[in-house]
Amino acid sequence: MTQSYLNEFKPPQRVLMGPGPSSVHPRVLQAMTLPILGHLDPQFFQVMDDVCDMLRLVLHTENFMTVPLSSTGTGAMEAACANVLERGDVAIVCRNGFFGVRLADIAQRCGAEVFVVDSPWGKPVDVKALERELKKHPKVKMVGVVHGETSTGVLTPLPEITALAHRYGALVVVDAVTTLGGHEMQMDQWGVDVVYGATQKCLGAPPGLAPISFGPRAMEVLKARKSDVQSFYFNMKGLETYWNETRAYHHTSPISMTYALRESLRMMMEEGIDRRIRRHARVAAALRAGLEALGLQLLADPGYRLNPLTTVVAPTGMEETAVRKRLLQEHSLEIGGGLGDLKGKVWRIGLMGESAREINVFALLSGLEQILPTLGYEVACGASLSAAQRALVEFDAAG
Amino acid sequence: MTQSYLNEFKPPQRVLMGPGPSSVHPRVLQAMTLPILGHLDPQFFQVMDDVCDMLRLVLHTENFMTVPLSSTGTGAMEAACANVLERGDVAIVCRNGFFGVRLADIAQRCGAEVFVVDSPWGKPVDVKALERELKKHPKVKMVGVVHGETSTGVLTPLPEITALAHRYGALVVVDAVTTLGGHEMQMDQWGVDVVYGATQKCLGAPPGLAPISFGPRAMEVLKARKSDVQSFYFNMKGLETYWNETRAYHHTSPISMTYALRESLRMMMEEGIDRRIRRHARVAAALRAGLEALGLQLLADPGYRLNPLTTVVAPTGMEETAVRKRLLQEHSLEIGGGLGDLKGKVWRIGLMGESAREINVFALLSGLEQILPTLGYEVACGASLSAAQRALVEFDAAG
């Protein structure tokens, strides 16, 4: 037995450019060293209120039930479905990537009859196909859609989809795990009924909490339920009595993680939400320009590319894991591989939260320029860095 | 709008003597400031393995699936039930407090037909009544029992219950949220099939993760399931492929919290598991002696008292919240109130993990001696502190 657990753990400093977690600012890490408070301490209630206030600003919503769940984003996906759906309800889930597939799976586990609208991975949700499906199911209760598909790097515009779904009387549940804090989210204006995200991407906190918000239509559906929510842990009616003035015990809140989320949101308020989003757009433009200068092909359709996550097709015949392994070992830089159907075929490069910095773009491009030629893929030395630099300058000039 | 979220948050240093969270050692808080790693980083895999190795030592089990869930203890309660139970299965839940009631509720939400064995709050589980119930339901799949009832301060001995349940072919699911790290847990020797706990009590980490372990009989039941587990997030078959050598993505692990758990378990290894348990017994003896010297009545039956949590009956006619409020405001010391049927009637005093220190016993008794007389309850000055001190000396003399 090695008993490695007896040693002090000394993790290396990584440049985190995968699909999340992203790098976390020292101020946010430091917030977790603050003294623990009880989950029913009045001083902790203030922390809770602060976090909810700031989440509402990020989502542009007035929804009272805008809270961090004590889980990761996948737990929030489950919370959204479990609260909205009852056994036998009809749900339509738009699947244009791995997380759309997961959303349909979870809706099914909640007892719903699930119909899917599939689009090729790399394309946005097919709104016309969604309308055809809606017409077939007059009693549809929920339409599920992924705002930013972390598996493909595709952003799906929401306003058209919410308007359409509402015409058919359906609630719209939106997965904003990768977009929250990195793309605009006008929850109320766009008519999104339920939205959820995660802390470890563009919000800049460690993984472990998942913001979720329920709008008035969704709250009415919850109140009109005939059966118990199958999850006690994620039951919003139970959680509401902890987050509202009742302050009733539901489960013990993750105190230190809530401190971290508060500090990361506070840093976003200091930066400005719009500026944070613009920072993500700016570095993404540089990254794309650099990757294209390397002759690499981006997976997502040009008009629908996510800023926090860029998906690149690995060159034909190249063992993509070899590149990732060398980036990690030689440059202490992490990027992600493909999920599901895209496994072994793409790289997923994140520029999220604290990681969305131009130095990271240059670090990655430099690393690729050093590694790719040794694997038989020729590159013009420095060309990708110049292209990235030009894109930054052009972005700033465009204003 | 006050915008209090823009201010730096400066929590007071509390003496945490409620039902959890307990105080966290600076070493454990500091571990959360270590650089974030990706959840698929080989260096993080080592952290995961270390945590699992140490959890197995604490539980005295060889079970491979001994892992921290990305939730609090209530989530683990749900994970246990959702994995073991299918729609229409029969479950018997022993209810001798608030968390037994919750366990029955959750089993029901998982679609099981639930029968209950009720005991008065303050008493251990009634084994004879359990046997009568088992005889009535030949197809029972699960018996659920709370090892340490956090609502009443009662410890229920397990070996007799597991032997009995196994004679009737049932799996035994044990809630060890309050006992894990504070009382002995011989999972394999006692034949416990599923056990779960939480990080924020006797393990000495912040709230946010929940260790769980599935034994061989439970794993067989999982493999023989006919239907999908209704929870994707807590589905052990999905989680297994992340925690075993496959290392497949399931959800993004709470990295910083896992660092904290590793460090808190490492501190337990340094102290020694038996010594940690003995420390809990020692300070609990002092606390009980002090409370009884104040003339207060302990709720739990003498032979079945929890060490990490002591439940005291508030004096008749006294507004119990006033005492708690003043302890918090004047002494920065938190104790808990009653839950459910015991609301307004008892105080719950925790001595868990880092909080299980004799200085905390003296701090609380001193505070009570100062506050109680002002509310019309006379005490002999210093008597409770002397009694606690004598109990410590006697405990040490008994060896």
Image: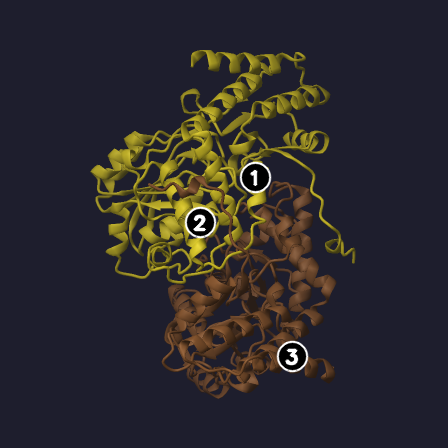
Chain colours: A yellow, B brown
Disc ID at residue A27: 1
Q: Picture coordinates of residue B220 (x, y %)?
A: 56, 65
Q: Amino acid at mark 2?
A: Val
The span from disc 3 to disc 1 (Cα, nearest Å) is: 43 Å
Q: Amino acid at mark 3?
A: Gln
Instruction: Name the residue beneath numbered marker 2.
Output: A47
The span from disc 2 to disc 3 (Cα, nearest Å) is: 38 Å
Farthest residue in the right direction?
Answer: A1
Chain letter behind tag 3: B
Q: Nearer the viewer, residue B299 or A206?
A: B299
Decide: few, some or many residues near mark 1? Use Cα within 10 Å; few <14, some 14-19, many ≥20: few
Identify the image quadrant of the N terminus of chain B.
Answer: top left
Q: Picture coordinates of residue A163 (x, y %)?
A: 25, 34
In this rendering, position of residue A310 left or right of residue B63: left
- Relative to B173, residue A24 above or below: above
- Badge nearest the viewer, 3 or 1: 3
Chain letter behind tag 2: A
Q: Secondary structure at mark 3?
A: helix
> Residue drawn 78% across and 55% down?
A2
Q: Nearer the viewer, residue B31 or A200?
A: B31
Q: Nearer the viewer, residue B88 or B244?
A: B244
In this rendering, position of residue B85 left or right of residue A173: right
Q: Quadrant of residue A143?
A: top left
Disc ID at residue A181: none
